[in-house]
């Protein structure tokens, strides 16, 4: 809940051994955005590691929301990688096809998962690099935070031939102290 008001009061009646006090807190419910996604995963221990970068690009092109490489140990103590992909339910089949065609995997697991996410939107803000897109995120307490979009920072860093860290820090400073 986002607290809007708090009130305290004391009654006249004596209630031994406890005080006759009342506290009321009013507010509005904070609702996270709820949705359902699919998790698709497989474990690989026999593939050229150079393929993973290409696979990640292909998965994002095919609707993946996020892609993880998780180091694991497989049978016979072989090092391997768990590929875990979060995707909308309607992208499940294309993500599965992508994994099975682009990797050495012989099969995948998939399951539906529920999640809650903070409300967010893309907004344009003026920075030292001009007008750029940032994420406007609403926290559970109602406060707002802004975060630069990675792709925007990447593009600026490449265009200006400066470290992405410098771009990110400069944009964050512009958000704190607007131009």
Image (cartoon, rainbow, N blue to C red):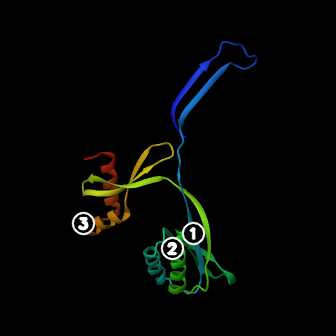
Residue appearing at x 47%, y 80% in the figure: 55
Q: Distance between the residues labelled 2 and 3?
A: 36 Å
Q: Residues within 10 Å of mark 1 (few under 14, many from 20)?
A: many
Q: Say which element carries label 3.
A: helix
- Whichever of labels 2 and 3 marks the residue nearer the N terminus, that label is 2
Where is residue 133? Give x, y as percent: 32, 58
Residue lying farthest to the front in this orientation: 90
Q: Is residue 110 above or below residue 49?
A: above
Q: Where is residue 85 in the image (x, y as percent from the top left)?
A: 54, 72
Q: How many labels does the image show?
A: 3
**Residue at 41 percent of width and 48 percent of height:** 145
Residue 91 disc label? 2
Q: Tell me whether circle 3 and circle 1 mark residues in contact (CB < 8 Å).
A: no
In the image shown, does 11 or 49 lie closer to the viewer? 11
Foreground label between 3 and 1: 1
Q: Are marks 1 and 2 in contact (CB under 8 Å)?
A: yes
Which residue is labeled 3 in the image?
160
Q: Which of 19 and 61 is in front in this view?
A: 61
**Which quarter of the figure has residue 168?**
bottom left
State how far apart marks 1 and 2 are (Cα).
9 Å
Cβ–Cβ below 8 Å for labels 2 and 3? no
Where does residue 76 sit, x and y in percent of width and height? 69, 84
Residue 137 to residue 113: above or below: above
Tell me the crowding category of disc 3: few under 14, some 14 to 19, or many 20 or more residues within 10 angstroms, Cα based: few
Q: Judge whether 10 appears above or below 143 on screen.
A: above
Check residue 59 in the rendering and tell me which mark sits there, or answer none.
Answer: none
* Alpha carbon separation for disc pair 3 and 1: 39 Å
Which of the two marks, 2 or 3, is nearer to us in this view?
A: 2
């Amino acid at each position: 809940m986002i607290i809007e008001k708090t009130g305290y009061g004391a009654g006249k009646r004596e209630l031994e051994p406890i005080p006759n006090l009342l506290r009321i807190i009013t507010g509005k419910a904070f609702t996270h955005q709820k949705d359902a996604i699919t998790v698709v995963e497989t474990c690989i221990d026999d593939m050229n590691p150079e393929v993973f970068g290409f696979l990640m690009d292909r998965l994002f092109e095919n609707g993946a929301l996020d892609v993880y490489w998780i180091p694991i140990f497989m049978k016979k103590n072989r090092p391997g990688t768990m590929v875990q992909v979060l995707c909308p339910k309607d992208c499940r089949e294309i993500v599965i096809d992508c994994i099975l065609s682009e990797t050495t995997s012989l099969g995948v697991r998939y399951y539906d998962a529920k999640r809650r996410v903070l409300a967010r939107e893309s907004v344009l803000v003026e920075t030292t690099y001009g007008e750029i897109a940032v994420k406007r995120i609403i926290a559970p307490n109602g406060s707002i935070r802004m975060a630069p979009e990675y792709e925007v920072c990447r593009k600026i860093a490449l265009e200006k031939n400066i470290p992405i860290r410098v771009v990110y820090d400069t944009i964050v400073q512009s958000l704190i102290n607007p131009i």
